[in-house]
Image (tube, rainbow, N blue to C red):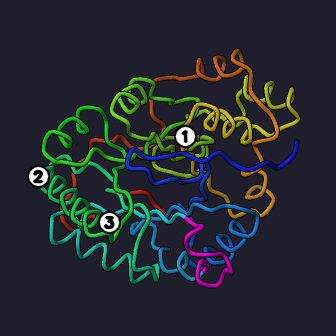
Amino acid sequence: MTTNPIPTLTLNNGVTMPALGYGVFQTPPQETVDAVTEALRVGYRHLDTAAAYGNEREVGEALQRSEIDRGDVVVETKVWASDYGYDETLHAFEKASAKLGLEQIDILILHQVAANLFDRTIDAYRALERLLADGRVRAIGVSNFPIARLEQLMDATDVVPHLNQVELHPYHSQPALQAFHREHGILTQAWSPIGGITFYPGPWGDDRRSVMDDPTIREIAAAHGATPAQVMLRWHVQQGRSAIPKSVNPDRIRQNLDVAGFTLSADELARIDALDTGTPSGPAPEREFDATMLFPIPEA
């Protein structure tokens, strides 16, 4: 395989971004600077973090240390539910901006549906609209929103989300949600795009099957001289999604970006699509929060 440029995606407001980004979920702060520095070195130009990850400051530090032009890197972060509400979310932007060391954040999204605080969720999104109008952010969106909540949000606000970041891998590909996104011009962005949620530590049970070990994925990978992760990322890229793989291993950081040198056939894409179980491996999108609740996924 050869390393070729990663395709660019265009959001519904004209903002462009690479199809593959680098994520820092569960990356301890003390490892984040080196990991992000390596990701930037090998060619990633989209960084995804979150207030709840506890490593925004380190992402910003790695970006400041790099010699890459600021305009060449898309930085995305998320507002956690404890900061939902109009004024609270405006303040959350100020906190994120200060930690990242950026006056403008490229993409700012709501991290989760707060099912029992949905009025505050709506107010938080209205704050994102204000930040967008003021030029403080370039694009806005949500994460982990199912169709019904997207419809409620869109009925109550003015700006259709530019993207929705959701659990999406071969064992949970959410075809109905993807179809809704296409209908409304919302970019589908995949967290856990190589199925990490099916094997890394978490409170979701020990009976999960690792998509990385799936026979179909491994057969397709062998046919292309690729890794299972590369096959899954190629599947996302060819189907027009944004995907955010995560690793702190330098070899895997590089390999996860090297997916442009082969093409999956229509039959191979269909075989991967057929692996969908319809069941998430991570937390359910609809959860209740109180105002002081911390991120519910433990650090590994």
Q: Nearer the viewer, mark 1 or mark 3?
A: 3
Range of magenta residues? 62-73
Between 85 and 41, the one nearer to me in the picture: 41
Residue 181 lies, in percent from the top left, at 38, 33
The residue wearing badge 3 is: 294
In the rendered image, residue 103 lying in the magenta stretch gets the answer no
Q: Amino acid at mark 3?
A: Leu
Where residue 236 appears, as percent x and y from the top left, is 61, 36
**Comparing labels 2 and 3, the label whose residue is closer to the camera:** 2
Marks 2/3: CA–CA distance: 19 Å
Q: Is residue 10 left or right of residue 39?
A: left
Quarter location, residue 240: top right
* Nearest the eye: 119 or 5: 5
Position of residue 46 measured from the top left corner of the image (x, y, whole percent)? 57, 60
Dot 2 falls on a residue whose secondary structure is helix
Name the residue beneath numbered marker 2. 119
Mark carried by residue 206: 1
Of label 1 and label 3, which has the lower sequence position?
A: 1
Q: Position of residue 138 (x, y in %)?
A: 39, 62
Q: Is residue 27 left or right of residue 227?
A: left
